Amino acid sequence: MTRLSNATLADLPSDVERPGYDRAAVKTGVVHLGIGAFHRAHQAVVFDDALRSGDLRWGILGVSLRSPGVRDQLNAQDGLYSVVVRDGIEDRTRIIGAVQGVLVAPEDPAVVVAAMASADVHIVSLTVTEKGYRLDPASGGLLTADPDVAADLADLSQPKTAPGFLVAALAERRRTGLPPFTVVSCDNLPHNGARVRSAVLAMAEAHDPALAEWIAAEGAFPQTMVDRIVPATTPEDIATQAATLGVRDEGMVKTEPFTQWVVEDTFAGPRPDFASLGVQLTAEVPPWEDAKLRLLNGAHSSIAYLGGLAGHEFVHQVVAIPAFKAFVERLWDEAETTLDPPPGLDIPAYRADLMARFSNPSLQHRTRQIAMDGSQKLPQRLLATIAARLDADQSIDDLALGVAGWIKWQEGVTETGEPFTVDDPMAAAIAEALSDAETAEARVRAVSALSGIVSPRLASDPRFIETVTRQLDAVMTSGVAAHLAAQV
Ligand code: NAI
Ligand code: CS2
């Protein structure tokens, strides 16, 4: 079947939204590292809105630091792809024209660095997953034992890591007399701007202290909170979209109507008129970020582990079960006491919206996808919340049940007997730690002793150990569904 492209754009069904601007006149103002599904459904839509408004500075050059998949999907389509918004009743398609092409960094790192050092590029954004910054979760420093990090610390002529590419490109801009670009992390990490800044400064310091000083003084690393549920695209989605469009779109993404982007307004140079595009500019991102990471993502991870263990494939199936829904509400009751809601955020309404979003059956959001990388997600989604509750001498039963679900998940088999691979950069270390831990308490103590996941503050708190142990023992003994049903 013919592919979506500039040549087939005019032939699409009349109800499909098209870019509506002259793509040939668009400049590349953004380089995005980690051009996955989320960027294409979230930030790229905002930059496409900027282009539609007539500000043609905001074309995007996508970069994959690892694999050619998205490049092969999009370059054959002149960068065009569908954002399919599924509200549970109907699907709406918008064709995004902002992405001008995709580079695969390992094929020619120097081309990526040169693109990032272009005078037209003002923003380098990232969605490289929580693990992509190569930071030690415990110390916050660079993972110097990581071979790619070690290679970049020694030689930046052929960068391998996100911090390496950022520093190599900033060095080139400084050499050629250009100002820095603004680095905009759009990953689900607390203080994401500060984290990427510390990774960049550590990498720069290893090469040239004067460069590090220039970046620290002239650079900008705004903090962001990002939110739009974007499940991974499946072959069935692509086939359905091909039937809808009449052409094949290998780069499509599916998502929900809801989208939110909160950005700290500190930029080193030009940016789009974000406020006119629905982006919230503020000096105070943390309250928005805490609410989102602790309410949405804390529930998401708990649903993924406990619902996945109980044999449920999708999020909407889990929250359709009263005992699971009641658990999520109890977890939110615990989590919301740790928040300092920003003006304009009504927590009861936010929780109701979240439950409606989770219940959207047309998203088909797989519990297995959310369960990925738990060692990188739990600290900000459940463990920080637990620490805040314990600091206030408050109970942690349901937050602890989410952690217990994650520990049980490490066994790599559901309660229905289905084996699966634990997809986590620390999977081997966790499996090793659990290898001779038989009892619930032994398992809790084993994972709590691992560096980088459970903080020493929590690992040494008997209330944490006891509550997670009690919940894990109940799951091991009765199973998830029975344990939850007994609490309704
Ligand atoms: P994806 O799997 O479609 O894309 C992940 C991207 O990260 C790919 O380009 C991949 O090459 C890159 N990557 C993975 N590990 C890396 C590493 N170690 N170093 C460098 N690059 C690496 O996933 P998706 O859906 O785009 O999500 C990416 C991130 O976006 C998430 O981890 C999260 O931080 C954030 N996000 C995702 C949302 C979603 O619902 N999918 C919503 C809100 C935030
Ligand atoms: C999910 C997030 O996969 C996951 O870890 O919890 O990607 C979630 O879909 C987003 O944070 C929603 O904004």
Image: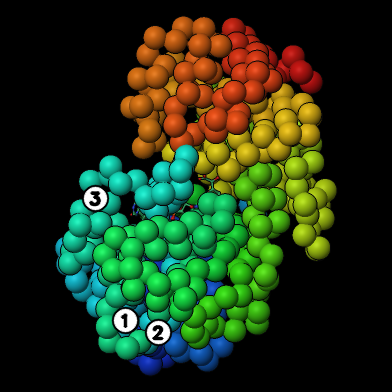
Give the crowd class for mark 3: few <14, some 14-19, many >=20 residues within 10 Å: some
Q: Work out whether 449 lies above or below 22.
A: above
Q: Which residue is drawn at 51% across and 41% down?
A: 377
Percent position of residue 437, x then y: 44, 10
Residue 49 sits in which quadrant? bottom right
Q: Name the residue under label 1.
A: 173
Asked whether the residues under the numbered discs 2 and 1 touch, taking CB atoms below 8 Å apart as contact, a structural biologist would say yes
Q: Earlier in the sequence, mark 2 or mark 1?
A: 1
For residue 150, the mark is: 3
Q: Earlier in the sequence, mark 1 or mark 3?
A: 3
- Side of 305 where 135 appears, left or right: left
Q: Which colour scheme is used?
A: rainbow
Ligand 1 contact, mark 2 (Cβ < 8 Å): no
Disc with the residue nearer the chain's start (3 vs 2):
3
Spatial CA span between label 1 and label 3: 23 Å
Left or right of 407 in this view: 462: right
- Residue furthest to the front in view is 209
Q: Could you say which is closer to the camera, residue 454 or residue 347?
A: 454
The x and y percentages for residue 334 are 76, 35
Asked whether residue 252 is in view, the answer is: no
Q: What residue type is labelled 1?
A: Arg
Residue visible at 50% across and 11% down? 442
Q: Position of residue 104 (x, y in %)?
A: 24, 63
Task: Tell which of 104 and 10 is nearer to you.
Answer: 104
Mark 3–mark 2 distance (CA, rounded to whole Å): 27 Å
Q: Mark 2 points at which residue?
A: 179
In this image, 166 relative to 52: left or right?
left
Residue 118 vertical placement versus 360 (above, below):
below
Location of the C terminus (image quadrant): top right
